[in-house]
Amino acid sequence: MSIIEPNSLLPVPTGALRIPELPRATINADGEPLLSLVIPTYKEAANIQKIVSILNNLLDEFIPGNYELIVVDDDSPDGTWKIAQSLMEEYPQLRVMRRQHERGLSSAVIRGWQAATGRVLGVIDADLQHPPHVLLQLLQAIEQGADLAVASRHVEGGGVSSWSFARRLLSRGAQLLGLIILPGVLSRVSDPMSGYFMLRRDCIVGQTLNPVGYKILLETIGRGNVGKIAEVGYVFSERKEGESKVTWKQYVDYIHHLILLRVSTGRLRRFSQVSERVGFPIDRFLRFGLVGLSGVFVDMVLLYLLSDPTTLGLPLTRSKIIAGEVAIVNNFLWNDMWTFADVSSQQREWRQRLKRFLKFNMICLAGLVLNVLVLNLVFNFVIPNRYIANLIAIAVATVWNFWVNLKLSWRVTQVK
């Protein structure tokens, strides 16, 4: 085992999100941990000492000294990482990593796995909503031959404590959507949204992972070499301390992740590889497309409110100009905050943002002209169906808008 100075922080791995093999000497060495359990945290100061204490006592009883706990904290403003670091002397199996330049639960888990030295990798939330005693059942399933052991709310012994009807509906709806988009992955487990599982390190060694949002299990099954899967029931408890991290953005990221996995695996993988070679980032394009859908919704709603005789009753052309421009503003803001966030975060001054907006606006107006030209060409000379022609025109304009904005609007030119 590598020697780590008492109370020192683990260095944060950099580069691709790829799990390395264990050195042969490490695999054969006595005393090396069987289990490396990652605890991703953000603003969990109220919970971190409790979860570390519970896990330490539990694992010390069943696999004494044969495990490591790795807290990966995203530089919490409440000092979660400091509290965890102060516990390292009391709990010698505890390691702590503080990430200052990356964010996100999924990438935090993978960075923890990259630093791990165990043959079995696992993840558990720090908020005590995952019952720790289930770890022993998951570990038993791995020892009995499973490649992946998942804690599930949807098998015998599982459930949720006090979810509202709306929350249950959203969860089931998200699962159904996943089965439609990515059936080969989501059909393998009853609870693909679970964030509580273990797997053999060999299943994902050497695979380049590219997670979006919170659902690391999807990435693990979709890109890993996972054979036998076991499921263990657990009851998801309500949070007692701290604040929930679940927002509407997590659902958007979930859909984005499903589409990205669909494109980058299976039959569409070759297309994804070609797009990367020609400098056309498919993951950004998918985000750009989702933002574009929100703009269509904004445009349609405003057009109705402005032009319908039962509302304001403004002239159609004037209403369309206003609705279109508001939709462009909507699209710019979301693209600036999400699609091209890594670029815009380096150019935060209002003059730079205004410059990006003006470029975006002009490119989108040019895209509108292109849309009309393609619509007429296709309708008059190729396919005499106005709706199919319109879909083709929208697709061409979308690719134009994305490609030109990628090259002109969101690029780093001035950094202090």
Image: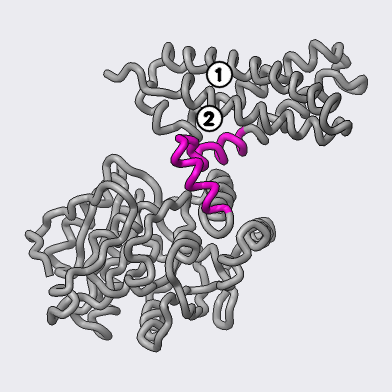
Quarter in which the C terminus is drawn: top left
Q: Nearer the viewer, residue 334 or 366?
A: 366
- Disc 2 target residue: 335
Q: Amino acid at mark 2?
A: Asn
Residue lying at the far bottom of the rendered structure: 144
Question: Percent from the top left, x then y, of residue 273?
Answer: 48, 47
The residue carrying pointer 2 sits among few (fewer than 14), some (14 to 19) or many (20 or more) residues within 10 Å by Cα, namely: many
Residue farthest right in this picture: 309
**Which picture quadrant has residue 307?**
top right
Q: CA distance from mark 2 to mark 1?
A: 10 Å
Please tell me whether mark 1 sits on a helix, a strand or a loop: helix
Image quadrant of residue 72?
bottom left
Res. 87 visible in picture: yes
Q: How many marks?
A: 2
Residue found at the very far front of the displayed protein: 381
Residue located beneath label 1 in the image: 360
Q: Is residue 141 left or right of residue 236?
A: left
Measured as percent of width and height from the top left, residue 271 is found at: 55, 47
Q: Residue at x 61, y 38 (%)?
A: 290
- What residue range appears in magenta? 268-291
- Please tell me which residue is depicted at 19% across the width and 76% down the height of the picture: 27
* Callout 2 secondary element: helix
Mark 1 residue type: Phe
